[in-house]
């Protein structure tokens, strides 16, 4: 089971490496021993950093999946949080999803699931329309694009889910998260997607133990559910 505390060092030969995808985007990659399949991890808006390097290594070890995590802002990795928020409207879904699919291909093993956090969770939802993944687990991913992020290259996550297989989705949601208002969550559930609501949890309550919003017990439960969902969906694919 995924524990909610600081990630431990990866065991065995599961050391990560930065690779460059065919799209030109950098990604963190860890090959699992005797993998059951692949896993794409889409980071939050802050992007690749030690938190995600450690997560990728740990998921490879504990989930026994070869893992690849692409950056969300290729060529602009030095942007700070404010810069990334301002540049969100410039993101183009086709380009981001091309990176996500390239990361799946880079795993070199099938089937491949995708998980994502915050903005990465939004793109895990948008990836449903690609049909590439056996399972999608968005952690507090936006179900509708926030107004401040809307740009000409952006489509709605909810539309992407409806265009694909909603049953391949398990959304991890905090009820106190302003980025996922109740009406949006209800609309996602109405498509047939799975939704797990954590009462009183705010945005970002799972993946970063350093965040004030972190809730260790809920985080551990969310990781357990995510692992079981991915395993069941991908075994059946």
Image (cartoon, helix red, strand yellow):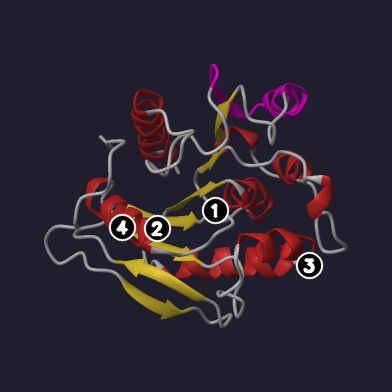
Q: CA distance from mark 2 to mark 4?
A: 5 Å
Q: Residue at x 62, y 41 (%)?
A: 141
Which circle's residue, 1 or 2, is located before the other in the chain? Answer: 1
Marker disc for residue 237: none
Q: Give the labeled residue for mark 3.
A: 90
Q: Give the labeled residue for mark 1.
A: 44
In the rendered image, the quadrant that contains the N terminus is: top left
Tell whether label 4 touches label 2 (CB within 8 Å). Answer: yes
Q: Is residue 228 left or right of residue 103?
A: left
Q: Residue at x 26, y 48 (%)?
A: 7
Residue 113 percent across, percent down from the top left = 46, 50
Based on the displayed image, in which of its 4 quarters is residue 165 positioned?
top right
Q: Which residues are magenta?
A: 182-200
Tell whether label 2 touches label 1 (CB within 8 Å). Answer: no
Q: Give the labeled residue for mark 4.
A: 54
Q: Residue at x 56, y 63 (%)?
A: 100
Marker disc for residue 52: 2
Residue 203 percent across, percent down from the top left = 57, 35
Residue 102 percent across, percent down from the top left = 53, 70
Q: CA distance from mark 1 to mark 4?
A: 14 Å
């Amino acid at each position: 089971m995924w524990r909610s505390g600081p990630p431990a060092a990866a065991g065995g030969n599961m050391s990560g490496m930065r690779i460059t995808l065919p799209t030109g985007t950098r990604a963190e990659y860890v090959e699992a021993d005797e993998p059951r399949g692949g896993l794409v991890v889409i980071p939050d808006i802050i992007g690749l950093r030690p938190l995600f390097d450690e997560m990728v290594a740990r998921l490879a070890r504990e989930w026994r999946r070869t893992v690849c995590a692409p950056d969300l802002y290729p060529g602009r990795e030095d942007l700070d949080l404010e810069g990334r928020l301002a540049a969100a409207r410039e993101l183009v879904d086709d380009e981001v999803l091309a990176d996500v699919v390239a990361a799946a291909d880079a795993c070199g093993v099938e089937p491949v699931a995708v998980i994502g956090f915050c903005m990465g969770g939004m793109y895990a939802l948008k990836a449903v329309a690609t049909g590439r993944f056996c399972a999608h687990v968005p952690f507090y991913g936006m179900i509708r694009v926030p107004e401040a992020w809307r740009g000409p290259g952006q489509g709605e996550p909810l539309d992407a889910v409806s265009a694909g297989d909603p049953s391949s989705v398990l959304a991890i949601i905090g009820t106190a998260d302003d980025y996922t208002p109740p009406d949006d969550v209800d609309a996602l559930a109405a498509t047939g997607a799975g939704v797990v609501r954590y009462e009183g949890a705010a945005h970002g309550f799972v993946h970063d133990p350093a965040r004030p919003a972190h809730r260790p017990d809920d985080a551990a439960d969310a990781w357990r559910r995510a692992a079981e969902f991915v395993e069941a969906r991908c075994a059946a694919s």
